């Protein structure tokens, strides 16, 4: 019988569903709460006996560190620390997608207020400024003119975190009031949805479900499936939330790839089935 590790910060609805799916599979489950202890940098006994682990920490930093420690202990982790590092930092994600020839919006990276304003002017208005590391659409700003750009850049420059000194400037895509979330397990699509901007939302472009966006089941077109397949092939099989964006001229692009995607709101009543797929995929990767 395999032992599955669940590395998490708290028992979210997704992690509760994964816990139930693991118990139903007959596997032994060990929950590792990332904040509840200190960890040896080599040979920590907490990873002893694990055959495979799922990385579901709420924190990108904690997730990468603990995944790397588990891997050094010989435990396969889903997703790998390498895939997490690529997906958890939007700048690295964009650079990776561009290198692999995968369509994605244009991005410029800057490290000072002056060069950030130059980047925004180069991209053209409107432009998007977002933190390279973050989730739930937090601190994502659309700047429509120079005055807005100066205000946002000045605010970011006054903040204390080192990532606030990294200016990720992305072209604005005038999408049709929605984007597409594709949830991948292994190398297969588990489900796909439109994420639509809520009519009551205070924003005019953020589709995130935690910002009031709404989910609607959607069947991918062959072109979308091909783009998703190309992205997963480049990253390696795993658990991903791939966000696709539709350009006004009909082209498609990959906006982001999430390495520990939430799924209870988007999958709805199918949440247990998705959790079962994840657990089955994880156990198939278990070391013997």
Image: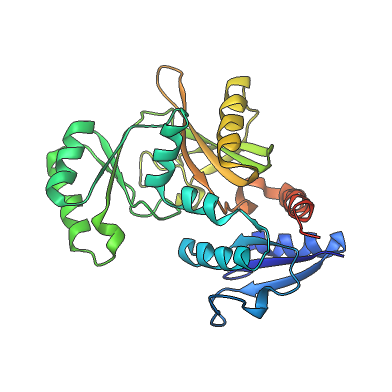
Left or right of 192 on screen, residue 137: left
- Residue 92 appears left or right of 66: left
Q: Quadrant of residue 21?
A: bottom right
The answer to whether residue 126 is above or below residue 158 is above
Note whether 105 is above or below 87 in the view shown: above
Task: Indicate left or right for 147 with 108 as reference.
Answer: left
**Relative height, residue 85 to residue 48 (above, below):** above
Asked if one can make out residue 125 in the rendered structure from this viewpoint, the answer is no
Residue 2 x, y percent position in the rendering:
82, 64
Q: How many marks?
A: 0
What is the basis of the colouring in this image? rainbow
57 or 269, nearer to the observer: 57
Q: Residue furthest top?
A: 249
- Figure quadrant of the C terminus: bottom right
Q: Which quarter of the figure has residue 177? A: top left
The residue positioned 45% from the left and 53% from the top of the image is 136
User: Which residue is at 48% across, 61% downward?
Assistant: 60
Q: Residue at x 57, y 68 (%)?
A: 69
Question: Where does residue 80 sit, x and y in percent of width and height?
Answer: 59, 54
Residue 74: % across, % down: 67, 64
Residue 68 appearing in the image: yes
Q: Residue at x 62, y 63 (%)?
A: 71
Q: Quadrant of the N terminus?
A: bottom right
Residue 225 percent across, percent down from the top left: 62, 27
């Amino acid at each position: 019988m395999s032992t599955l590790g669940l590395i998490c910060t708290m028992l979210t609805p997704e992690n509760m569903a994964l816990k139930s799916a693991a118990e139903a599979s007959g596997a032994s489950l060990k929950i590792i709460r990332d904040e509840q202890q200190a960890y040896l940098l080599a040979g920590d006994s907490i990873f002893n006996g694990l055959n495979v682990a799922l990385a579901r920490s709420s924190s990108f930093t904690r997730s990468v560190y603990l995944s790397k420690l588990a891997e050094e202990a010989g435990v396969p982790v889903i997703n790998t620390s390498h895939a997490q590092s690529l997906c958890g930092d939007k700048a690295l994600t964009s650079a990776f997608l561009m290198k692999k020839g995968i369509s994605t919006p244009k991005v410029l990276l800057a490290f000072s207020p002056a060069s950030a304003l130059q980047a925004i002017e180069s991209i053209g208005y409107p432009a998007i400024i977002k933190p390279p590391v973050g989730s739930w659409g937090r601190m994502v700003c659309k700047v429509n003119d120079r005055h807005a750009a100066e205000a946002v850049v000045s605010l970011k420059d006054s903040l204390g975190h080192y990532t606030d000194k990294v200016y990720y400037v992305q072209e604005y895509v005038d999408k049709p009031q929605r984007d597409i979330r594709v949830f991948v397990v292994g190398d297969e699509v588990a489900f796909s949805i439109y994420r639509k901007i809520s009519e009551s939302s205070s924003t005019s472009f953020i589709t995130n479900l935690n910002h009031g966006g709404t989910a609607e089941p959607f069947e991918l077109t062959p072109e979308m499936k091909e783009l998703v397949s190309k992205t997963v092939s480049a990253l390696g099989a795993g658990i991903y939330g791939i966000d696709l964006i539709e350009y006004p001229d009909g082209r498609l692009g990959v906006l982001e790839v999430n390495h520990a995607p939430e799924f209870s709101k988007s999958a709805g009543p199918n949440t247990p089935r998705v959790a079962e797929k994840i657990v089955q995929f994880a156990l198939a990767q278990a070391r013997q």
